[in-house]
Structures are given as C-alpha cells and as structure tokens.
Amino acid sequence: MVKIRLSRKRVPTNQAQMELDFMRPQERDRNGHLGGRSFYFFDFDDNVAYLSTPIVIFNKTTGSEKTLSSGEWARLHSNIGKSGPLADYTIDYNDETGSFRYFRDQQLSFIDKMVRRKQTFLSDIEKVLAQADYSWKAPSWNCFYHATFNKRPTSVITARGHHKDTIREGIELLVREGHLPHSPNYLSIFPVTNPEVRVAELKDPALKAGVAELKREAINQSVEEALRLYGNSPYHRFGMSDDDPKNVELITEEMKLLKRKYPQMSFFVIQTFEDSYVKTEVLETKTKNSSKQHSSSLSSQKNQLDLF
Ligand SMILES: [Mg+2]
C-alpha cells in the first residue's frame, strides 16, 4: 500500500490571535511605482520567533555544563570568560559536543529516522506550535508576516549552522500551521555558522570569523544578489532586523559601506528588544535614529512596517 502524506494548511483555531487579515489586499513595494523594491533581511531567533534551543557553556575548572537561552546569550556572551557571573565559563566551538550543538544539524541514523527524530530547529518549532498561545512570536514577527504576505524578497540571516534546507523546512511548518499565508519569497538563506556556507559562500575558509562578521558578509552578498536578480535601482530599500547588539553594530558598519557604494538606495537597521525596537537609517558616515518605540502597540508595528 502506498501511503501519501498530504500536507494541508491549517487555520489556527483562535483567529483573534492572527495579527493580520488574510483577506487584506497586497501592498506594492513602497517605491514600486519608481521601479524600486523593498528587501527584508531577518535574524531568526528572538527576532522572528522565540524558540527554546539552549546554548551550552562549560565551567573552566569542572567542565560542568550550564545552559543559556538565546536571549540570555545575546545579552551576556561578550562577558563569558571575562567578567561578571559567567567569568568562570568558556565557550566550546565543537559542532558535535560544544556550545552550539543544538544549533547544528546532527547526523541522523536509520533508527533516528525510523522514530522520526528531527533536527532540533524543526522539533523546537513544533514545540512552540503546540503551545496554546502565540507568545513565541518575537518583535519582528509582524514584519516577517508582512514581507511574506506581500512577497517581498526576503533573506534569513541566522547564526544557526543548520543546512539551508532545514531552515526552509522549519519556516514551512509555520506555513503549514497557518501562521504564514505562503512560503516567503526567498532572496537568500544564510545559516552563517554552517561550515559549508562559511567556506563556500562567506569567505571564511579557516572557520575563524565570528557570527557578527559572518552576518556582515551575508548582508553584503544578499544585497549583491538582490541587484543581480532585481536590477539596479536607486529606489531600492534594504532593512535588516536583529536583536543582538554586537550583530547590530557590525550590520550597521556593513550598511554604511553599502550606502557609500550605492548612495541613492536606502538602508535601515532595526534593533529589536523584547518590548521595543530602534529603527535607524544608515547614512554614508553616520546613522540617523528614525524612531524608538514600544513594539506592542499597533501604531508602532505599523511604523516598523512603514519603513518598507
Ligand atoms: Mg537573534
């Protein structure tokens, strides 16, 4: 007997929680009438969604493990091994046994596959989708929905090191469960710590660059890819959102370079916090703070979207 698995799009039972209307008309890109497109680049964890994937750090003396959420990591990682409560801990970069082992694809054996064991990115998304509420939606979720709904060219630029297909499959789960109307119009997917991606695409053959540097290169390549695919228009607009201050700093530096190279195009960085965000327009030598708002109010969400 041949079993066919049909994937059916479900509509969440609590429609009131869906933040945007399925029936609303698609909006054109802000500069669409001038030939410009709006490109959206997203960090994933704690920006689009909160997942429970832990980061493991190791006590320098005893080797004992301590787990951090990705939010704690974003706030504390620059002090690990140096100062504060995590001064005695260290980060281990081994993909199989180290700090980020849950952010990498693991080799699944035949038995693993038989019992339908999945890569952690997928099982962590399934876990949040099983929750009764939608508190897993992070500050840029509405922006991600908006970009997807309106088919804006979208890049996912994440510190995770899974295979690109795993990232795509994880986002597909959100589509299947009715949280997104269809798949994003992908411009690029950069899981920047994936070894193959680092070597083949991000000019890091010795696997030495840090996440922020890798994201910086991923942004550069996503902009160049955008121009290859959509042509070179002075009316293009690019925006990247991320919750990690170190990433935001280097993303801004990269966007300054891009602005110098393409001075007529517009570049924005949105730093997200749990309950607010700061939107900055990047100019050639400086930045211009566009706004700082609470992300919970409807008007501020609209303001974040209005960028593009
Ligand atoms: Mg993040």
Image: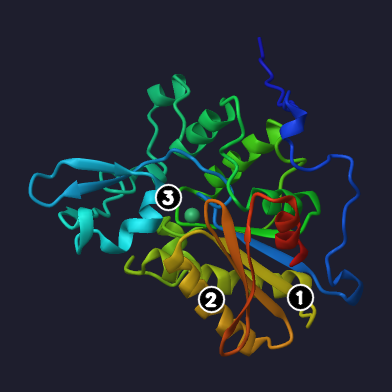
- Check disc 3: other Cα within 10 Å, few if <14, some if 14-19, many if 20+: many
Question: Residue 200's x, y, as percent?
Answer: 46, 65
28 vs 43, left or right, is right
Badge number at residue 236: 1
Report the disc number at residue 207.
Answer: none
Q: Does residue 238 appear left or right of residue 122 in this picture? A: right
Task: Tell me the element at label 3.
Answer: helix
Q: CA distance from mark 3 to mark 1?
A: 32 Å
The quadrant of the image that shows the N terminus is: top right
SS of the residue under disc 1: loop
- Kindly identify which residue carries mark 2: 252
Taking the image as shown, residue 153 lies to the left or right of residue 209, namely: right
Q: Position of residue 86 (x, y in %)?
A: 22, 54
Task: Kindly identify the amino acid type of the residue bearing the numbered disc 3.
Answer: Gly
Q: In percent of the image, x 76 and y 75: which residue is there?
A: 236
Image spot of residue 207 (x, y percent):
33, 65
Mark 3 or mark 2, whichever is nearer to me: 3
The answer for how far apart the CA atoms under marks 3 and 2 are is: 21 Å
Choose between 149 and 204: the one closer to the eye. 149
- Mark 1 vs mark 2: give the one in front: 2
* Residue 38 against residue 43 in the figure, above or below: below
Q: Amino acid at mark 1?
A: His
* Residue at 74 percent of width and 67 percent of height: 307
Q: Is residue 295 visible to the viewer in this orientation of the structure?
A: yes
Q: CA distance from mark 1 to mark 2?
A: 17 Å
Q: Give the mark nearest the N terminus, 3 or 2.
A: 3
Picture disc at residue 71: 3
